[in-house]
Image (cartoon, grey):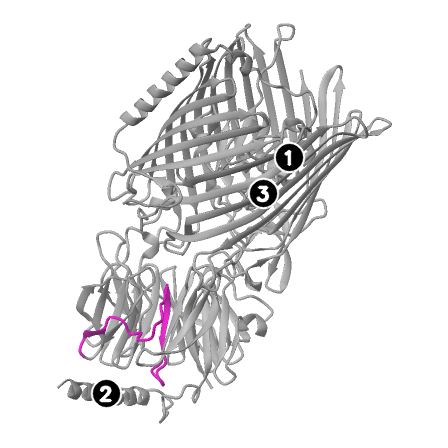
């Protein structure tokens, strides 16, 4: 009985993997060999607030070479203070440098700066149809044309917006209100990506920060709660009706990165384990995704490779020394680990 | 609940034990005194006529007196002690910038600052901004590792890893000239205007008073070179203006040497800019402000009974108000406006007596109540009641002196809402000894062991919206072995003194604050091992032809290693901001009324994070100061004129990452005494 179930699982997993791969631009028949399609990975390290020590670590898959700060190698200046997010779109890389009030646009493959755009306390970046969307603590999402590299529109959203996700032709923005303590925000703004206007605000658990989407029409929102009587939690939004279909409390730690791929959603719990949630059955698959003997002290970022299914988990350690990024295969077995800079907050894969 | 670390931890529920202890103590004193009446003789203070500094203390000590402040181009207490061995000043730059001190690799919260024997306590931050403490009314500053040598003192003097003792100017007038007025003004770079006045008045044979007042105004501006990656540009530090006033008055009563009383009131008011970190791509930070309104009243009574029992009573009330405003906070309101008020009620009672002519014992109890309010949402409004009890003893046997003390700390905390830290009852011992092994009394060997801790501050416990009430005290063990050599000479050198101390400190349950944008986390995160060396040389020479020369050299070695986790990549790495080598040099030549001085401080490279790699690197620096002082008379009235240059060679450097320090600056001052 058990065997049959497992078999079933494997088949569905394989099926889902193929399906998911199909939805991407490039299809690779042997997805399990890393490096066949990827050139390497970038890790954006926040550094310490006020230290101006944000760095960009690059790991080259082919050469197995680690460059601790490729940004200063490629450019004549430092990245700045608290690099918060990094996204690659086409040949360009967009780096959100939060405390330097900066959006750096660089060549994805060389990290060479193309343009700098000043934005007030920018937080994160996503892309959709030749536009980049950047949240800012001024309560807005800036729309930037990725060709002309100019701001074409600024959309008002909720308070202290954090992360975004594109799902079903819509942009979902987590409005944390985190700087208005104790009066947190508790909404997710829905932006129509055709009209570039906010169409709805969905109420979720207080203080939503991170957000991701699966291929089953669900948008997952992690909220930190109010650090008092309202617990942290997860809200799952139906991307057709834009209604919260389920909401539950979770025991989350200080850092709450979330990532989804295929059938699974990954997020860290208060005991610094990586929970693996089944998107298809909407049930917790495993309390700890990691099967190798690896301890993550401070899980700071999670990224899943949509080609290989590998899961990359960043560890910020003591927040004032270099962190690590550990790569796991899709079964949770450790593959390798690389050293990053201080507070590795974003892992982004670079294609060849 | 029971924790066992090298100290002894116990939990007690009643005060009856202390009263029993006090009773036994008094009984012992009375019994001993009934048998002998030699205490008077022993009480005599040994005043050395030599010029050699007083270094032969049982624990390492370093002093600076008022006459030397200009020699070190010092404008505040932080400047005055920066040359001391083992001292590390964290300086955020500029005239109003925060300056805190840490000693021998232990954090700034492990030093207690005493003002005429009574602690300037800050339950909120646990650190005193030494940049704020003006030198106008200071007579002497002393730093003691471990604790001061005297055992008749408030219990708080026993309750920190090191003590910085500030002694104020006392009126010393006779009926011939019953008043003394000193007025002066300092001006120079940073747009500084600092007039001050001191009035000493003798009222009667028993009564006298002193009043000090100053005004400090400065725009605080200075130029620095901003190294924005590979591009260097000249920028001006703005938003660091200060407008401060202080009034300090004390009334003294003395009836012969055995009975003394004083009452002091001190009020400080300031409005200053708080320049933040210099951030890449952002305009120079400006606009954040701090307002302080601090009041304290302090009284002391010292009485030596004919019976030989010596008592020392100290009382203090303080109220500290702090207002912080940040006009550029990216919240919906767009600003941050916070108000904090702390109160302290403090009473100390100490008594000592000689059980034998060579054996003195003391018992001290301090009770303090600290509370804090803040207009932060969900603030806990903590009240902390601390009871300290100390039994101490000094025993002299031939050329050996033994001293030991046992401190009991009892902390109870209450909050208006939510949870708080558990009741703490901790015993912490100190043992010290000196020996003069040779016939030559100039040479002395000393050593001490002290176990002490610091309790988490109100900020560490309650500032953030995640409160950290699981925090435990940060514990330290200090071991020191050293020697002193001090000799008065008749030849070219008037005296020579040399000290050297090797020490080992370890810290467990280190309280580590990690800031992040929403709220920092505070945890008992680490263990630290510190091995160090302090060495000092002082001498004074007669060069002939009326020239005198002074020289003082200090060297410190500090290996402060993170030993939290042997498997971690930062294991055995040097702690942030602690230089391995510090070298301080001060020399001067004096002829008649004119003195010319040069001061130099060299710090080896430091790291501002735990990595100890290139990205954390803060380069070594050498900063030099020079001053010329004229001490003469104008129409028979004593005047002092001085000109000082700080950072003589215009060195561009940082003590704290992203906080550039001022380049060359000037200060001139004039003082007249009527």
A104 over B649 or under it: above or below = below
Q: Name the residue under label 1.
A: B484
* Quadrant showing the C terminus of chain B: top right
Q: Earlier in the sequence, mark 1 or mark 3?
A: 3
In 3D space, how far apart are the residues under numbered discs 2 and 1 (Cα atoms)? 77 Å
Which x, y percent locates residue A271? 29, 63
- Residue A125 covered by magenta stretch: no
Q: Mark 3 points at which residue?
A: B86
The answer to whether B284 appears left or right of A41 in the picture is right
Which x, y percent locates residue B577? 54, 51
Foreground pick, A47 / B402? B402
> Dividing the picture into quarters, in which one does residue A278 lie?
bottom left
Label of residue A10 in the image: 2
> Dividing the picture into quarters, in which one does residue A255 lie?
bottom left
Foreground pick, A271 / B61? B61
Q: Which residue lies furthest to the bottom in this view?
A: A29
B144 over B29 or under it: above or below = below
Marked residue chain, label 2:
A
- Work out whether residue A147 can be spotted: no
In this view, the mark in front (1 or 3): 1
């Amino acid at each position: 009985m058990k065997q049959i179930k497992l078999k079933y699982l494997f088949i569905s997993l394989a099926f889902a993997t193929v399906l998911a791969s199909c939805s991407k631009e490039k299809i690779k028949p042997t997805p399990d060999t890393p490096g066949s399609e990827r050139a390497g990975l970038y890790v954006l390290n926040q550094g310490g607030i006020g230290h101006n020590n944000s760095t960009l670590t690059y790991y080259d898959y082919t050469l197995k070479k680690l460059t601790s700060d490729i940004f200063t190698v490629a450019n004549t200046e430092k990245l700045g203070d608290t690099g918060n997010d990094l996204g690659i779109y086409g040949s360009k890389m967009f780096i959100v440098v939060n405390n330097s009030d900066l959006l750096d646009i660089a060549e994805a493959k060389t990290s060479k700066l193309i343009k700098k755009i000043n934005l007030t306390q920018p937080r994160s970046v996503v892309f959709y149809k030749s536009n980049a969307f950047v949240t800012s603590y001024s309560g807005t999402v800036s729309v930037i044309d990725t060709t002309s590299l100019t701001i074409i529109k600024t959309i008002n959203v909720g308070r202290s917006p954090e992360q975004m996700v594109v799902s079903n032709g819509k942009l979902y923005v987590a409005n944390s209100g985190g700087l208005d303590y104790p009066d947190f925000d508790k909404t997710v703004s829905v932006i129509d990506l055709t009209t570039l206007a906010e169409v709805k605000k969905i109420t979720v658990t207080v203080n939503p920060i991170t957000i991701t989407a699966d291929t089953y029409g669900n948008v997952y929102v992690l909220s930190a709660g109010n650090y008092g009587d309202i617990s942290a939690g997860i809200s799952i939004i139906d991307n057709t009706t834009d209604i919260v279909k389920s909401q539950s409390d979770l025991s989350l730690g200080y850092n709450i990165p979330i990532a989804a791929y295929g059938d699974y959603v990954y997020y860290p719990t208060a005991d610094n384990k990586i929970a693996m949630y089944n998107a298809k059955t909407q049930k917790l698959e495993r309390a700890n995704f990691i099967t190798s003997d690896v301890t993550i002290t401070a899980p700071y970022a999670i990224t899943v490779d949509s080609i290989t299914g590998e899961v990359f988990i960043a560890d910020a350690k003591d927040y004032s020394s270099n962190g690590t990024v550990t790569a796991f295969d899709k079964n949770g077995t450790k593959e390798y680990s690389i050293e990053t800079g201080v507070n590795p907050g974003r892992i982004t894969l670079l294609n060849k | 609940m029971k924790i066992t670390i090298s100290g002894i931890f116990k939990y007690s529920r009643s005060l009856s034990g202390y009263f029993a202890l006090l009773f036994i103590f008094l009984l012992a004193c009375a019994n001993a005194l009934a048998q002998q009446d030699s205490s008077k003789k022993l009480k005599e203070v040994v005043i050395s006529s030599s010029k050699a500094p007083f270094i032969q203390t049982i624990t390492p000590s370093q002093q600076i007196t008022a006459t030397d402040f200009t020699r070190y181009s010092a404008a505040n207490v932080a400047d005055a002690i920066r040359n001391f061995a083992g001292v590390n000043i964290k300086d955020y730059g500029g005239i109003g910038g925060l300056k805190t001190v840490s000693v021998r690799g232990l954090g700034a919260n492990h030093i207690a600052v005493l003002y005429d024997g009574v602690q300037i306590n800050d339950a909120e931050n646990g650190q005193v901004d030494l940049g704020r403490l003006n030198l106008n009314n200071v007579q002497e500053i002393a730093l003691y590792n471990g604790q001061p040598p005297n055992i008749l003192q408030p219990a708080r003097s026993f309750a920190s890893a090191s003590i910085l003792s500030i002694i104020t100017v006392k009126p010393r007038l006779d009926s011939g000239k019953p008043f003394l007025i000193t007025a002066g003004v300092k001006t120079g770079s940073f747009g500084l205007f600092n007039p001050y006045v001191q009035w000493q008045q003798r009222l009667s044979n028993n009564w006298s008073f002193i009043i000090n007042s100053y005004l400090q105004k400065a725009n605080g501006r200075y130029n620095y070179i901003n190294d924005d990656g590979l591009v260097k540009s000249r920028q001006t530090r703005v938003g660091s203006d200060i407008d401060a006033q202080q009034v300090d008055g004390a009334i003294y009563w003395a009836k012969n040497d055995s009975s003394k009383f004083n009452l002091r009131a001190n009020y400080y008011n300031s409005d200053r800019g708080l320049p933040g970190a210099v951030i890449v791509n952002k305009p120079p930070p400006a606009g954040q402000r701090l307002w302080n309104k601090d009041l304290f009243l302090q009284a002391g009574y010292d009485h030596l009974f004919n019976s030989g029992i010596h008592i020392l009573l100290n009382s203090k009330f303080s109220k500290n108000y702090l207002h912080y405003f940040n006009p550029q906070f990216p919240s919906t309101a767009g600003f941050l406006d916070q108000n904090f008020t702390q109160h302290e009620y403090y009473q100390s009672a100490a008594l000592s007596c000689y059980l034998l002519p060579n054996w003195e014992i003391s018992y001290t109890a301090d009770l303090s109540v600290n509370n804090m309010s803040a207009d932060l949402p969900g603030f806990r409004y903590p009240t902390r009641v601390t009871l300290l009890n100390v039994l101490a003893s000094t025993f002299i046997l031939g050329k050996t002196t033994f001293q030991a003390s046992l401190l009991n700390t009892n902390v109870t905390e209450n909050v208006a809402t939510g949870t708080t830290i558990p009741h703490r009852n901790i015993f912490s011992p100190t043992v010290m000894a000196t020996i003069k092994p040779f016939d030559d009394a100039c040479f002395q060997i000393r050593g001490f062991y002290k176990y002490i801790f610091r309790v988490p501050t109100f900020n560490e416990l309650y500032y953030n919206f995640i409160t950290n009430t699981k925090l435990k005290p940060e514990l330290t063990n200090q071991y020191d072995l050293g020697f002193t050599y001090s000799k008065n000479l008749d030849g070219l050198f008037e005296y020579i003194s040399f000290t050297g101390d090797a020490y080992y400190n370890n810290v467990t349950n280190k309280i580590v604050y990690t800031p992040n944008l929403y709220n920092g986390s505070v945890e008992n995160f680490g263990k630290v091992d510190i091995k160090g060396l302090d060495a000092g040389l002082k001498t004074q020479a007669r060069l002939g032809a009326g020239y005198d020369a002074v020289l003082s050299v200090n060297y410190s070695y500090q290996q402060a290693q993170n030993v939290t986790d042997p498997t971690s990549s930062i294991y055995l790495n040097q702690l942030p901001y602690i230089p391995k080598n510090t070298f301080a040099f001060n020399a001067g030549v004096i002829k008649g009324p004119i003195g010319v001085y040069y001061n130099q401080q060299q710090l080896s490279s430091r790291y501002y994070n735990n990595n100890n790699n290139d990205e954390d690197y803060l380069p070594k620096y050498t900063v030099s100061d020079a001053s010329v002082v004229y001490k003469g008379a104008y129409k028979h009235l004593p005047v002092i004129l001085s000109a000082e240059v700080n950072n003589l060679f215009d060195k561009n450097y940082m003590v704290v990452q992203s906080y550039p320090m001022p380049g060359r600056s000037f200060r001139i001052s004039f003082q007249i005494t009527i």
